[in-house]
Amino acid sequence: MSSSNLIKIIIALAIGIVLGLIYGWVVDPIEYVDVTPNILREDYRVDYVLMTAEAYQKDFDSETAARRLAILGSESPATITANALEYAIANNFTETEIQYLQTLLTAMQTYSP
Amino acid sequence: MTRNSTLHIIFALLIGLGLGIAYSWFLSPVTYVDANPSILRADFKDQYRIAIAASYQSTQDLARAQARLILLGDADPIGALSAQAQQMLAAGEPFEKVRPLAQLATDLQVGYVSNPNTPTPLPTSFSTPQVESTVEVTETIIPVTEEAQATSIPTLFFEQTPLIPTFSETITPRPTSTINPVISIPFTLVGQESFCEPSQPALMQLMFMDSRRNQVAGVEIIVTWNQGEDRFFTGFKPELGNGYADFVMQADTIYNIRVVTGGSSVSNVFAETCTEPNGFQYLGGILLTFQQP
């Protein structure tokens, strides 16, 4: 095999790899199902924390609230709530929503399992 | 270029294609971030629904609860809520934990808040944590008068779900659950009707309505007979009505029914025998209708 043919084969191989990567990453990437909540987009995560805060306004059950927040990852419930509160303040949530999150944050900061 | 070298090039291209796909699918697949709730695992979706229902119990914002449920991508959100409620009951979960799901399913079915919160009297002052921009919490006493009111408009903070501001609420610092005055009024048996339906043999159907003939969900019923007892609630089959519940009777058994909510009871209920024109016999059903005065 001549060197020019070898170069052509290497180029063909490289083109094939590039096409394969484009196909696998862009055209038909792996579709995820059954994911865990820790990879939810931030606004969905915050909305989930807000739901927990809204529910907390009715039952004032810190344990239930902490358990609900635990599905969002390994961070402490207080950290998760604090992050949500920062997002809420930065994104102009209503005063009521921010107050709910503040109340939940206070509860989570004082909650000990 | 010889035919042989052309084959080599095509072969190299195919090998490269295979290597690229293998790398992108197995070795380094697309890292998923910013997922949406519709691809959550089933048990997390259940948790999400519980959170939606619990939040709805507090805020009574039906439009927002509906928007949140849509995020889960269920083909039939009401059916999914009802199914989850029934599964939780079957798993021995207390009804108090299941009630928010059933209530939300019912309200979505009827399209309005059927069991509104009763506001509690405002105290003269309450503590509200104040948060700085650094999210450090301090306690501040804020005076509140009986007239203190604010209008809250839910905001849209994710683009996928338009949230419709539909209500204004009176802020109460600590809204507490109060007994619904509507549901505590005793139910009276206003109809007892036997029916013969081969597709529903021995089915005891119970229907509960308020004084305006609106069906009432969440009514607790206890059926007792000489060998046992069963306890169930209305509203878990919203497709048949929010005030509907049913129970399958046995032959030669007399049942007593007690409506826990309100305290009324019906005794000596049994399945009558029905006979088809061709002589086929089966147990008939009975429809009991209760209404508040």
Image (cartoon, helix red, strand yellow):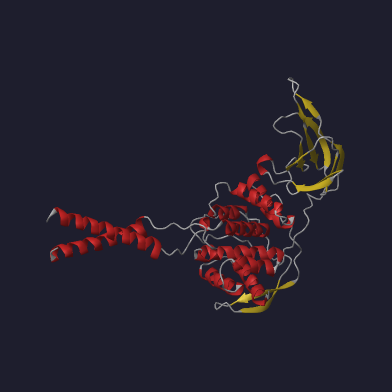
Is residue B220 visible from the viewing direction of this image? no
Q: Which of B132/B21 is in front? A: B21
| Residue at image location 67% in from the left, 77% down from the top | A110
| Residue at image location 73% in from the left, 60% down from the top | B119
Residue B40, percent from left and from top: 53, 58
Q: Which of B139/A106 is in front? A: A106
| Residue at image location 80% in from the left, 29% down from the top | B273
Image quadrant holding the N terminus of chain B, namely: bottom left
Q: Dividing the picture into quarters, in which one does residue A21 lie?
A: bottom left
Image quadrant holding the C terminus of chain B, namely: top right
Is residue B20 visible from the viewing direction of this image? yes
Residue B101, percent from left and from top: 66, 53
Task: Judge from the rendering whether residue A82 lies leftward or rightward of residue B212; answer left or right.
Answer: left
Residue A76, percent from left and from top: 59, 74
- For the image, the number of numbered tags is 0
Residue found at the very far top of the displayed protein: B277
Residue A3, percent from left and from top: 14, 66
Q: Which of B218/A19 is in front? A: A19
Task: Judge from the rendering whether residue B27 lies leftward or rightward of residue B153; answer left or right.
Answer: left
Task: Judge from the rendering whether residue B31 lies leftward or rightward of residue B48; answer left or right.
Answer: left
| Residue at image location 78% in from the left, 27% down from the top | B274
